[in-house]
Image: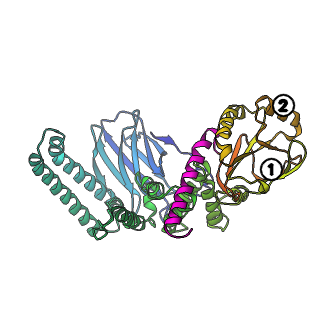
Amino acid sequence: MIRQLLLLFCLFFAAFAGAQESHEITIEIEGYDQDVLSLANNVLDKQYIVDTARRNEQGNFVFRSDTSALPKGIYLVVLAPNNDYFQMVIGNDPDQKFKLETRKEKLSDVEVTDSRENELFYNYLGYLDQQQDVSAPARSALQDTTLTEESKAPLIAQLDEINAQVMAFQETQVKEHPQSFVAAIINANKPNNPPSFDEIADEDDRREAQLNWLREHYFDHINLQDDRLLRTPFLFSRVNYYVDRLFIQHPDTISKAIDFVLGKMDPKSELFKYYVVHFTNKAAKSDIVGMDGVYVHMIDNYYRNGLAYWSDPEQMATMIENADKNRPLLIGKPAPNLQMNRRDGSPVNLYDLDARYTVLYFWQFACPSCKKSTPYMKEFYAKWKSKGVEVFAVCTKQRELPKCWEYIDDNEIGEWLHATDKYQRFARDYNVISTPTIFVLDENKVIVSKRIGAQQLDELLTNLELQRELRETEEKSTGKR
């Protein structure tokens, strides 16, 4: 779907226009009877309208500016009213003044005037379409599930030959026009299959070797120094696949993957700017537990040190403040101590609690979500209290403690450790901005999970115990215990 241009969060910079300072693109579409034509492009995972032209007296549509050039990339020429479109490129032509002619009945059939980049682009697309037509009968025949292996063999051989021809054509284009946008597109979409590593006998070890190879060589054919690739329909999915699919979704591992990607970009480039913002926003909005660790990493390594020079100073100060609030509460960090009082007034410190796991539960009596969580918390505690689990509960309405105690008594949850602090330091130390808020600590009071739902606690503790058993078994087998 084509969307109106939106301002990306905290993206306060103008697009590079290159050395050119104007553009004039004339479009003629035979059989198109609408009076409006739009120009759009891809940025990250979105498509944006960048300009709209009305039919002139000659029946053409002209996208023109005397003061700015279009950023390089793949563009969509979008027809009304159904958003039919054909593609064009803004590449390395000496200027951005050219004409494209096509027909509504076959938009892919484009005649180019004064744009070598688009000539190469349409020549390449035309060749691919031709090979698709040639291969169609064989691909269709292979859909027949009754075919024998002997019958399939010549069809597969035919497709292999066509594929070899396509690859040869691509190599020729890259060799003859190495600086063209088409060459960059071809290279960026080359398959990058890891070696077989047949010399490794163990299958799991062999797969691990292939995965490590792919992590290291994934971008061998994708030039992340090339800003033209920012405005393409494929780069975003390729980058996200690398970060999201080739690595365990742990904040430390993801942060390293992001650094690897950004390290291949020019810090002054549009690619770098957009992807720094993307990864920062993605971490900030993530529902995955612990991804605030990635957010803190992005702030510390790209904003705090001045690399994100395009950012608004006030907004950057807010982002740094948020990172500083979250840093002490990251998974793997020792939980801040709580020095509080029990219901009877006796003192209690979080770190004095001897428990295999401690569930910090910040709640309030009038909170609808807390009321829904109470039955889950009761069921969880009944199952796990004999296994060394304690619930350290804090009613956040400290100035209305009588109502807190009333709720506790009415719901029969007095077995939990209920603590109070008239100064409400817990709100600052644990950045409690909503209820219920849950933190799970191990026996050393290290944060192992946080901000999860009460209904998730049982599964979480089950998995933590399984991981503990696996670690202990491995330590015994290696003689560490």
Along the line of sight, the residue nearer the viewer: 224 or 196? 196
Along the line of sight, the residue nearer the viewer: 435 or 414? 414
478 in magenta: yes
Quadrant location of the N terminus in the rendered image: top left
Circle 1 SS class? helix
Task: Please report the residue visible at 37 percent of the width from the left and 65 percent of the height from the top.
Answer: 205
Which of the two labelled residues, at mark 2 and mark 1, occupies the earlier sequence position?
2
Could you tell me residue 240's position as x and y percent?
Answer: 47, 54
Q: Main structural element of the magenta stretch: helix, strand or loop?
A: helix
Task: Please report the residue visible at 50 percent of the width from the left and 63 percent of the height from the top.
Answer: 474
Left or right: 460, with 446 as reference point: left
Task: Please report the residue visible at 52 percent of the width from the left and 70 percent of the height from the top.
Answer: 479
Which labelled disc corresponds to residue 406?
A: 2
Residue type at mark 2? Glu
Circle 2 SS class? helix
- For residue 104, say whether it is visible: yes
Could you tell me residue 311's position as x and y percent?
Answer: 65, 59
Residue situated furthest right in the rendering = 345
Along the line of sight, the residue nearer the viewer: 424 or 217? 424
Q: Which residue is mark 1?
A: 426
Residue numbers of the magenta segment: 452-481
Please give the count of numbered marks on the rendered protein. 2
Q: Is residue 400 above or below residue 386?
A: above
Could you tell me residue 188's position as x and y percent?
Answer: 36, 61
- For residue 287, say whether it is visible: no
Task: Please report the residue visible at 62 percent of the width from the left and 58 percent of the height from the top.
Answer: 293
Residue type at mark 1? Phe
